[in-house]
Amino acid sequence: MTVAPPPDFLTALAVGDLSVFQADDVRRDELLADLVAAAWGTHGEFIDADQFLTKPTVLRRLASILAGRVPADVDRLVGRDPHSLVLGAAMALETGLPLVVARVVETGGGPRLACHGELHAGERVLVVEGVTGTGASAAEAVRAVRDRGAVVVGVLAAVDRGNGAAELLEGVAVALDHLFSDDELRRTATRGRGAP
């Protein structure tokens, strides 16, 4: 019995054979391992977003996977300067959606987060976060978007540390979606070291 060789990539695409692509769960698992390798333990036992968001290969794959979680009806992405701006820019390139920058400006009442760039009343916006902790920064970005009259459809984070972000955002009527949890990262980072 002769086994046919696997089709080349272009032939497989032409006939609709998607087996030439890596499965989503495999892509996610490989990204998880690379993210932990890039960022775990650089400042104690937690993920430092600056460590994984500055690695082009990790950032590119992260943006690709997160792009699949962007709702179809989103008009723009918002990235907070400086922490989530890199991820927001990578996702804008991946999705083709325009990016709005949320950054701190001085006002008569003190510093306040404000949106910069083209953003119109009624547009549907997704706030992008590298890592969420308490959710206070994401909630400020939500407020800044709403101040411009746009609608926030949600907050999408690469990592949620589980320190109350989901609950805080729920309190301002926004859902948090995240790719990885801190617990998952911790289990991956400590696997084989006798840690729980």
Image (tube, rainbow, N blue to C red):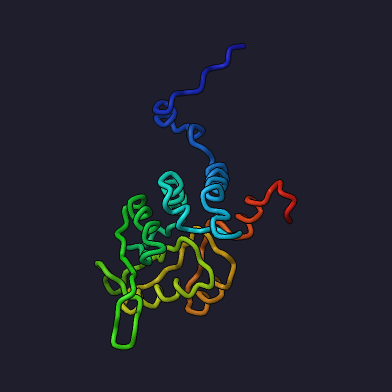
Q: Is residue 40 left or right of residue 13?
A: right
Q: Image quadrant of residue 126?
A: bottom left
Residue 68 at x, y percent in the picture: 45, 52
Instruction: Specify the quadrant that holds the C terminus.
Output: bottom right
Residue 126 in the image: above or below residue 145? above
- Residue 172 location, x and y as percent? 47, 79
Q: Nearer the viewer, residue 147 or 34?
A: 34
Q: Tell me what residue is drawn at x 59 percent, y 67 percent.
A: 162
Between residue 30 and residue 126, name the one nearer to us.
Answer: 30
Is 152 in front, or is 82? 82
Q: Relative to 3, is 96 above or below?
A: below
Image quadrant for the N terminus? top right
Residue positioned 46% across, 62% down in the render? 156
The vertical placement of 96 against 176, above or below, is: above
> Residue 123, located in which quarter of the rendered image?
bottom left
For the image, the number of numbered tags is 0
79 relative to 32, above or below: below
**Residue furthest out toward the top:** 1
- Left or right relative to 119: residue 45: right
The single residue placed furthest to the bottom in the displayed view is 109
x, y (%) of residue 71? 42, 59
